[in-house]
Amino acid sequence: MQVMQNLSPDSFTLVRVISALAELSMPRQAKWIHRLDEKHVSTWNAMIDGYGTHSLWEEAVELFEEMRKGHPKPNEVTFLCVVSACSHSGYVDKGRYYFSIMKEA
């Protein structure tokens, strides 16, 4: 898309690419999104969800914590993704922690 048509992807396109990589069990390849200039909450949510789907809770939590420090800020979907990531990996206590801070946000 970028090379052949000289088009820049929008946030919808990036979310779909990240989701596709996650479905292909390639969540680490989705990390290229970090090098984007413009960061959108939906792209971060897709990455966190992709990591969680493949039981990579540490990576999901790392991205979540990065969001809490900067921009964009986590939204309700972000919290759902990080709690789900903890759940997929069996870290119920971690999931409860993130659920509790969701109520404070």
Image (cartoon, rainbow, N blue to C red):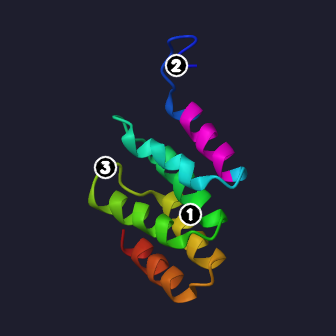
Measured as percent of width and height from the top left, residue 26 is found at 64, 52
Residue drawn where x is 63% and y is 84% of the image: 90
Identified by mark 2, the residue type is Gln
Q: Is residue 85 above or below residue 26?
A: below
> What residue is disc 1 on?
81
- The nearer-to-camera label among 2 and 1 is 2
* Badge 2 or badge 1: first in the primary sequence: 2
Q: In the figure, residue 67 lies in which quadrant? A: bottom left
Quarter location, residue 14: top right
- Residue under circle 3? 71
Q: Residue furthest bottom?
A: 93
Which of marks 1 and 3 precedes in the sequence? 3
* Span of residues in magenta: 13-22
SS assignment at label 1: helix
Q: Residue at x 46, y 42 (%)?
A: 33
- Count residues near mark 1 (Cα–Cα under 10 Å), then give few for <14, some for 14-19, many for 20+: many
Point out the residue furthest to the left here. 69
- The image shows residue 96, relative to residue 42, as above or below, that is below
From the viewer's side, name the closer residue of 98 and 59: 59
Instruction: Please tell me whether residue 8 belongs to the stretch shown in magenta.
Output: no
Q: Amino acid at mark 3?
A: His
Indicate which label's residue lies in the foreground, 3 or 2: 2
In what quadrant of the picture does the C terminus appear? Answer: bottom left
Measure how far apart labels 3 and 2 are at the Cα level: 25 Å
Q: Label 1 is placed on what type of residue?
A: Cys
**Mark 3, secondary structure of its residue:** loop
**What residue does disc 2 label?**
2
Could you say which is closer to the camera, residue 54 or residue 91? 54
**Local crowd size for mark 2, using a 10 Å CA cut-off: few (<14), some (14–19), many (≥20):** few
